[in-house]
Image (spheres, rainbow, N blue to C red):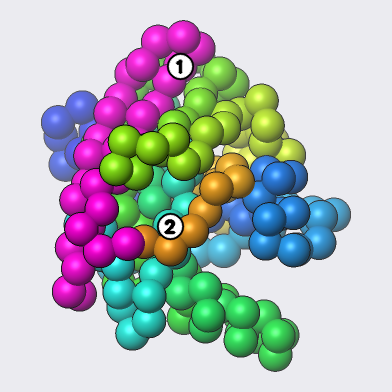
C-alpha cells in the first residue's frame, strides 16, 4: 500500500476522494457545464505517487490542488497535490457518457506532497503552482464553489472516511500539458503564511 507523510510520519490512505469542477474559471476553461451538485470521483491507493510523470499511454495534463487529510472525521492536515489526467481519453469517455476512472485513477495519477497538521477550520488555504519559475495556477478556498466544511458534510453522506483518507478539493484555472524536463513548484499558504513548499522534477519516461 502507498503511503504519504504527515509531519514526517508515514500514513496509509485507504482512498483519495477528488472534487471536480469546484472552481468556476476552471469549469469555463474546459468548456464544462456548471454543476448543480458536487462532482466526486475516486482514486485508489495505488494512484498515490511522489513522482511526477509526463506520459502514461498518452501525454498527461496537470491540475494543482489543495489536499486535505481526514482524521477522526474532520480535516486535520493540508498538502499540495497534482491530479494527473489523460485529457484525450477523458474527452472520449465523457463524449460516450462513460466513467472517467481510466483517465483519472491510473497508477501514479495522484502526486502528493507531505502533509502538515493544522488547527481550526480549513477556510483560509490557498495554492500557488509555478512551472519553471512561471506562475501557472493560483487559487484558494475563497474561490471554491464547495468549501471544505460543505465538502466534508456531503462526503459523509456517501462514504466512510477512514483516518488518513485524502480529499483533493479541485483545481483553479491554468491547467495544461506536462512538459518533459519541467520543474513544478507547489506552495500552500494559510492566510499570509507560507506553510508548505514542494518541488517535483518531471520524469520524462514513465
**Residue 96 visible, this angle:** yes
Residue at numbered disc 1: 190
Q: Position of residue 185 (x, y in %)?
A: 30, 38
Pick the residue in front: 196 or 57: 57
- Binning the other alpha carbons within 10 Å of mark 1 as few (below 14), some (14 to 19) or many (20 upward) gives some
**To which quarter of the image does residue 92 belong?**
bottom right
Residue placed farthest to the top in the image?
192
Residue 198 lies in the magenta-colored region: yes
Identify which residue is drawn at 52% across, 73% down.
87
Question: Magenta stretch?
Answer: 179-206
Q: Secondary structure at mark 2?
A: strand
Identify which residue is drawn at 34% across, 44% down.
131
**Mark 2 vs mark 1, CA separation in Å:** 23 Å
Identify which residue is drawn at 36% across, 29% down.
187
Indicate the quadrant containing the C terminus: top left, top right, bottom left or bottom right.
Answer: bottom left
Residue at numbered disc 2: 62
Q: Position of residue 200 (x, y in %)?
A: 22, 47
Q: Secondary structure at mark 1?
A: strand
Q: Is residue 62 above or below residue 189?
A: below
Amino acid at each position: 500500500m502507498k503511503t504519504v507523510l504527515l509531519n514526517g510520519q508515514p500514513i496509509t490512505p485507504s482512498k483519495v476522494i477528488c472534487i471536480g469542477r469546484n472552481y468556476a474559471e476552471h469549469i469555463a476553461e474546459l468548456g464544462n457545464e456548471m454543476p448543480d451538485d458536487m462532482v466526486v470521483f475516486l482514486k485508489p491507493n495505488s494512484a498515490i505517487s511522489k513522482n511526477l510523470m509526463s506520459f502514461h499511454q498518452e501525454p498527461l495534463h496537470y491540475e494543482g490542488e489543495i489536499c486535505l487529510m481526514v482524521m477522526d472525521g474532520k480535516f486535520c492536515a493540508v498538502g499540495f497535490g497534482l491530479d494527473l489526467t489523460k485529457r484525450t481519453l477523458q474527452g472520449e469517455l465523457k463524449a460516450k457518457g462513460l466513467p472517467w476512472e481510466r483517465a483519472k485513477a491510473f497508477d501514479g495519477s495522484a502526486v502528493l506532497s507531505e502533509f502538515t497538521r493544522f488547527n481550526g477550520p480549513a477556510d483560509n488555504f490557498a495554492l500557488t503552482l509555478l512551472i519553471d519559475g512561471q506562475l501557472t495556477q493560483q487559487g484558494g478556498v475563497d474561490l471554491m464553489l464547495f468549501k471544505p466544511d460543505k465538502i466534508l458534510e456531503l462526503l459523509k453522506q456517501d462514504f466512510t472516511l477512514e483516518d488518513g483518507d485524502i480529499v483533493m478539493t479541485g483545481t483553479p484555472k491554468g491547467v495544461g500539458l506536462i512538459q518533459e524536463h519541467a520543474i513544478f513548484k507547489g506552495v500552500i499558504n494559510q492566510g499570509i503564511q507560507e506553510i508548505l513548499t514542494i518541488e517535483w522534477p518531471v520524469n520524462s519516461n514513465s
